[in-house]
Structure formats: structure tokens, C-alpha cells
Amino acid sequence: MTHVGLEHYLVVSALLFALGLLGVITRRNLLVMYMSLELMLNSANLALVSFSRFNDNLNGQVMVFFIITVAAAEVAVGLALIVALYRKRQSAHVEDLTSMKY
Amino acid sequence: MGLPDILFYVFAALTLLCGVLVVANPFGRNPITSAMFLVLTIISMAGLFVLLHAFFLAAVQVLVYAGAVMVLFLFVIMLLDLKEEERRKIKLTGLIAGLASVGAIVVIFVRSLLATNPGKGLAEPQKVGDTATLGKILFTNYLLPFEIVSILLLVAMVGVILLSKKDLK
Amino acid sequence: MKYEVLPWVILFLPLVAAGIITLFTLKNEKVSATLSVGAIVVGFLATVLCFRAFRFSPQEFTTNWLDLGTLQVDFGLRLDPLSLMMLLIVTGVGSLIHIYSIGYMKGDPAFSRFFACLSLFTFSMLGIVLANNFLQMFIFWELVGVSSYLLIGFWFEKASAADAAKKAFITNRLGDFGFILGILMIFAIVGSLSFTTIEGEYTKAPLHPLGGISSIGEDSNAISVWGLSIAGLLIFCGAVGKSAQFPLHVWLPDAMEGPTPVSALIHAATMVAAGVYMLCRVFFIFTAFDLTVIAWIGGFTALLAALIAVQQNDIKRILAYSTLSQLGYMVMGVGLAAPEAGMFHLTTHAFFKALLFLGAGSVIHAMHHEQDIWKMGALAKKMPVTYWTFMVGTLALAGIWPMSGFFSKDAILAAAHHHSAPLFVLGVSVAALTTFYMFRLVFVAFLGSERTHEAGHAHESPGVMVWPLRILAVASIVGGVIGVEALFGGMFKPNAEHAHGLSAQLVYPFKHAPVAACSGLAAFAVGLFAAWKLYANAKTDPLPAKLGWLSRAMASRFYFDEIYEATVIRAHDLIATIADWIDRWIVEGFCLGLVRGGTDLTGRALRLVQTGNLQTYAFLFVLGVAVVLWFVLGK
């Protein structure tokens, strides 16, 4: 194993992103989909922090700070939406939510 | 190979493993399990942040993400009181197509990454990740986004309250 | 006194009147009539002023209208003896007919519309007379066609009137097609549409001994006489259509469906004369071949129409065929290289034919719109003024000395005698026939005993209708000796001698061309005698018994309408059916169907993407991202 460099962190970030993406496409429970979405956000955070570290630039970390904040707000609103949707449709299964079909 | 490198590999492996377990859960299709594993993923990522000298962010990650966001998730899961997700037929074509496209993205990423050769030659800088410096930048250069984000949180709060009312009069 | 503004006033005042009547005063009959009559009377007075000012110095007033590089077209008004004389006729005779219409159309519900159409017609006709280039003349030519359509079909509720209007317009269109082809050819030869420029180009060309040009341009790129002949013939097509020469003569008799003032104005005095006027205006473009064709077509039309008129029983139809015949005379005059004779006859014909039509209108008005001469009789005693003016008109038309018709007809006969013996014989025979059928009309309708109840109770028409008759009668008598021939002669043949002064003009025909003059008088005598023999106290028409099939053919107008119906109309219907089939099946069915079906299919295919399933959308999203990344990050 070589000395850990930027590309190692970036590979981890890429794999994490792919995992999150897979979860979004494959899982059919709304909540698990949403959690995979959070996973993707986290991978982006990791990438930003590693770039910030290896370029000696604190702007990356500031951006991560904001991303975490916004993600928190987004989760709150999104979960409220899911709750409202569940109340209406009595199902959290994404295949039941196809009323926008042509 | 020093301790930081070993620690990196440990945390990286942990993150990826928990990530997989979030998505493809062999212990049952309960979303609670996915949530728990997501918490573990977040904590391992906090460890990675520490290795990258982003101490403040690591703390924030644990506090906000693991402490608040995931708790919120768990609240909602409990609220919705989902039974075990019924075993619906897994659409094989969908699965294969999804795996293929995601795999393609990963392959493109990794190949372009290895081709550009980023890491060799970049030395580790001296002063990075100091909380004080971060705070200074946050309150001088990025003051406006800071304030706007606070308003954003207010707006989100109002929106959530409105959305989750039982009947909207 | 600014004479320059007068031509514009003359031209545009009727248009303004028509516009105001149409937009504002359709309900108010008095104001409409006043506006319309006022416009043309003012035009007449202005024309008299212009005549005095510009008679000896032709002028053009132009403004630049179209400027497209190689094509320069002006909007111009040309005043020379030809157009001034024509203006006097149009405005003078037109004014009298406008005044007459006030009486004739009284009580008609569409009174104001009539005057609006009359004013529009006046504007269009004045435009033709005053035009100084082909394009402007063509535009007003078409406008005249439209106005005559509106006026012939004035009582459009009657199907026959609407059909007649359509027939007139379409037949005119056929002539106009040839006309515009001719204009295009001339533009290609000369490069300009203005009459003065074209005349300049053509007069540089050598002349044929019998009249007309023989070639144009330098030797290397001289345009041969055949090209010029074809251009001339195509221009003549316009006159064939508008002046109802054979073979496009079929519209004029049917056009009698319009009110009688319309027949008088349009189909006696002005519109049909527009063709002859145009021929005289561009006389310089015709080659010898063209002139021969023109003369023979004119002569043939004259003979054909006269024969048909012999057996017609509707008073207006007789006069219509008489007009056709006289138009043939005028065209023949132009074709015999004597345009001044043609224009002279046009002028005198305007007077007496308008008089005859207005007189016929007076009779029809008195007989409560009965037009069959065999239902009239002994009207001379009941309607004396109408009778005497009608008699004056008949004598003028038949051509007895010293009426105006004698001088003008003699001018044409003299030209025929000079140029071509067959045409001379034809002209003399037509003169005899003319006298014959006109006196047939007079004997049957005015003299003899009354044949029906209405004839017994007819009475003279009101003053507003009778005074124009009187004025026109005076014009018919003196029209031959007021110097009209000298005026035209001065324009077209400045080197020949012309008579001046009253006594000189009275005996001029006998001195100048005695054979023609005496033959004309002899023809008159023959026709009068024959008519008197057959119709003086006839109860019914004796000719069908004597002439059998010939009489039937004459009465059926030599079956021209039927021939056209069977050939031209059938061919036209066939082409229309084919075009309809192509449009329905190929254009609409195939091409549009292709587009419609294609769009439909594509829409349906694309619709399948909208599954409503969130994960499908996410998957497509990922696919797109993968493609983009592949392109951005390299292979």
C-alpha cells in the first residue's frame, strides 16, 4: 500500500457516491431512497474536504459547512413531505406513487 | 506506512461497508436497519474528516448529521410505523440496468482519476483545518451566506410545520 | 389658376365620392346622389378647363411610384388631344347619365349603392384614360372590370344578373391574360413601361409601307417583326376582351341584365370604348401583320353582331348587338391604320348610343320594365320627346348626312376603300344591316298600333330623365362637324390635310372620298326600304318564315354560347376536377397525412417515457449523467 494521497480519498468518495446512486435507483421504500440520497451528499462532502486539505484552501471546508446545514434543512422538509404523502396515500412504496403517468 | 494511513484504510473500509449495508440489507428489509447503518457510515466519515484535519467539521458531522438528521429520520420511520416492507417482486431488468449504469459511472470516475495522477507530489501543508481560521473566514468572507443560511433554516422550519399539519385550514 | 392640380382632381374626386357614399351615406339617398353627380360634373367642368389649357401642348404629370432598380414606374397623368377628348366624353356623357339615373333608379332600395358603384366606375375609367404607362393602365383596366361586375350584377338577387356579371368578368379576364403577357413582352423588348419611352423606341424603327413598324433595334440584336407582331397581338387581346370583339363577344349582350343607365354608360359610351382607346394610345407598337388581324377581327365582329341583331326581340339586346357591331367598326378603323377614324367614330358613337340606351330606358320605365318590342307599339304618340330623340339617335347610328354618325362612319369606310376592298364591301353591308335592324326597332316599338295594354297606357318620363336625352340628341346632330376629326387627325396624322370650319366639314366627305360617302348613303337607303317593306305595319315578325334556319340561328346568337359551353367550359371543369383530386388525395391525404401520422407516432413513442415512476426518472437521470461524464472526462 502506498502513501495515502488525494486519489485514495477521491476513490472512496466516488464509490460512496455510486452506492448512494444505486440505492436511489434500486430501493423502492421511500425512506431508504432518501437515506441513500444522504449518502450521496456525504460523499460530496468527503470529496470537498479532501480537495480542501490537499490544496491548502479552507474554502472547501466552508462549503461543506454550508452543505451540511442545507442538507439538514432539506431532510426536514423532505421528511415532512413524505409524512404528508403517507397520510394521503397510506403507502411509502414508490411504485404506488405513479399518478403522473401519462 | 504510518498510523494515519492504516487508520485511513480502516475508516474507509468501514464507511464503504456500512454504505453497502444501508443500500442492500440482508438482515431484513426494515428501514430501521438501514438507518442504523447510515449512522455508522456517518460516524466513520467523521473519522475520515479527522484524518483530513477538518476537526470542526468532524464534530459538526457527528452533532448535526448523526445527532439530529438521523434522529429525525428515525422519528419519521417510527411515526409511519412501517411494517416489514412486503416482498414485492424484484424487477431483475431494473436491477441489472441500474447496476450497469452506476458501474459505468464508477468506472469512468476511477479511470479518469487514475489517469490524471493527482496525488503524487502534493505535500501535506502545514496549517490547515484550524477551527479558529475557519471561524474567521466564516464570519468575514462568508458572512452573507451565513446569514442567508440562517434564514433558510427558518423558512424550512416554517415549511415543515405547515406541511405536517393534520388538516390545512 | 393652377392647371396642374386639375387632372388629379378630375381623377380622384369620384373615388372620394364613392368612398364617402360607401362608408357614411348609404342610407341617405339624396346626399349620395348629390355627391356622385357632383363629383362627375365638377370633373367635366375641370376637363373643359384642361381642354382649353392643354389642347395644343401635351403634358404629363407624374410622381415616382415604384423604384425597383431596373423597373421604374411612375404614377402619371397624361393630357394630350386623345386623352382630353376621351375625358370630355367620359365626364360629359357620364354626367348626363348620372343625372338620368336619379330619375331611373328612384325607388330602388339600393339607390345609394348604385351611385357608389357608378362613382367607382368613373374613377377607374378616368384612370385608364389618364394613364401614362402600361402598369397603371392595367391596374385601372382591372378596376374597370371590377366596377362593371358590381354594376352588371347590381340586382344580384336575380340569378341571371349574377351570372351575367360573372360571365363579363371572366371573359374580360381571358382578354386581360393576353394583355399582361403583351405588356411583359413589351417590357422585355424596350425595358420600360412608360408610353412616351416606348413610343420613342418604336418610332426610331423603320416603318412598313402599309403602316406599322417592321423591326426594332440595331441589326445585330434586332427583334424580328414576328416577335413584335406577337407582342402587338397579345396587347390586342386586352382590347378583344374589353371591347367584346370576336371571340370574346359573348359577355356584352348578357351584360344588359344591369340597369339601363349602366348599359348606357358602360356598354355604350365608355368601358367598351376603353379597348379602342387603348389601341389608339399604343398604336405605334403594331406591325402590319397585327393591323391586318385587327382589321379583320373588327370587320368580322361587325358583320356577326349585325346579323344577330336582325332577329333579336329585346330592345336592349338589339342595342347591345348594335354596340358590338359599331365596336367592330372602330376596331376595323384602327386596323386600317386610321386610328383617328376609329376615335372619331368612338366619340360620335358615345353620343348616339348613350342617347339610344337612355331612350330605351325611358321606354322600359314607361312600360313598367317590359323589354320585348313585340309588346310595344304606337309609343310615338304617347312619349313624343323620347320618340324624337330616339329617332335622332337612330338616324345618327344609321349614318345619314348631316348626322354625326355619317361623318365618322364615312371616315372608316374611306379608310377601308383606300386599303382593302373586301373590308370595304363588308363595311357597306354592315351599314345596310345597321339601318335595317334599327328601323325595324323603330317601326315595331314606336310606330304602328299598340300591341298590348301597357303600351296603350305609357306616358312620358319625368324631366330629369328627358333632359339628358335632349342634350345628347343635340350632340348627336352636331357631333360630326365640331372639329373632332381635325383634333384627332392632328394627333395621329399631322401631315395630312383636315377640314376646318363648318361648311368645309359638311362637304368634306364628298370631296375627300366620294365613293365611300355615296356607298354609305346607298346602304342607308337600302336598309330603310327593306325595313319599311317588312315591318311598317307588321303584327308579327315576318322574317322567320322567309329565312327559316338562318333566322333561328340569328335569334340564337349563332349558338356561340352553346359552343363555348360544350368546349371551353367542359375542359375547364375537367381540369378543375383533376386539380381537386390532386389536392384532396395527394396533398391533403398523402403529404399532410404523413406529417400528421408521423407526429402522432412520435408523440406516442415519447409518451412512454412518462411512467410516473420516480425510479424510472432517476435511472434515466443517471444514464444521462453517465453519457455526459463519458464525453467530458474522456474515454
Image (cartoon, helix red, strand yellow):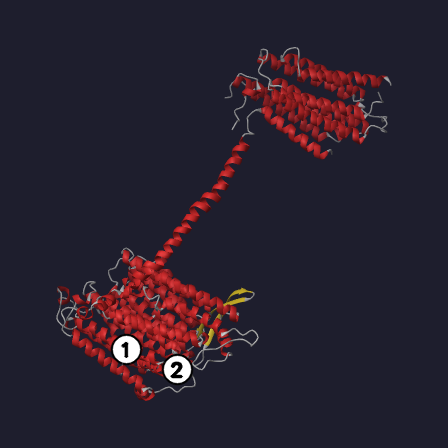
Q: Position of residue C83 (x, y in %)?
A: 40, 74
Mark 1, Cα crowd under 10 Å, few <14 / some 14-19 / many 20+, is: many
- Labels 1 and 2 share a subunit: yes
Against C156, residue B108 (above or below) is: above
Classify residue C531 by image quadrant: bottom left
Instruction: Using the rendered image of the protein, determine whether residue C17 is visible from the camera's viewpoint.
Output: no
For residue A80, side relative to residue C88 (left or right)? right
Classify residue C305 by image quadrant: bottom left
Instruction: Using the rendered image of the protein, determine whether residue C266 is visible from the camera's viewpoint.
Output: yes
**Which amino acid lies under the numbered mark 2 shown in the image of this protein?**
Gly
Against C373, residue B117 (above or below) is: above
Q: Position of residue C356 (x, y in %)?
A: 25, 72
- SS category of the residue bearing label 2: helix
Against C265, residue B163 (above or below) is: above
Q: Nearer the viewer, residue C547 or C346?
A: C547
Tell me the residue that label 2 is attached to: C489
- SS category of the residue bearing label 1: helix
Q: Position of residue B34 (x, y in %)?
A: 66, 14
**Which amino acid lies under the numbered mark 1 shown in the image of this protein?**
Ser
The residue shown at (69%, 25%) is B103
On-image quarter of the C terminus of chain C? top right
Q: Nearer the viewer, residue C389 or C276?
A: C276
Q: Earlier in the sequence, mark 1 or mark 2?
A: 1
Q: Nearer the viewer, residue A81 or C444?
A: C444
For residue B79, side relative to residue C478 (left or right)? right
Q: To which chain does the residue with label 2 belong?
A: C
Q: State which mark lies toward you, 1 or 2.
A: 1
Q: Which residue sits furthest front?
A: C549
Cβ atoms under marks 1 and 2 closer than 8 Å: no
Tell me the residue that label 1 is attached to: C429
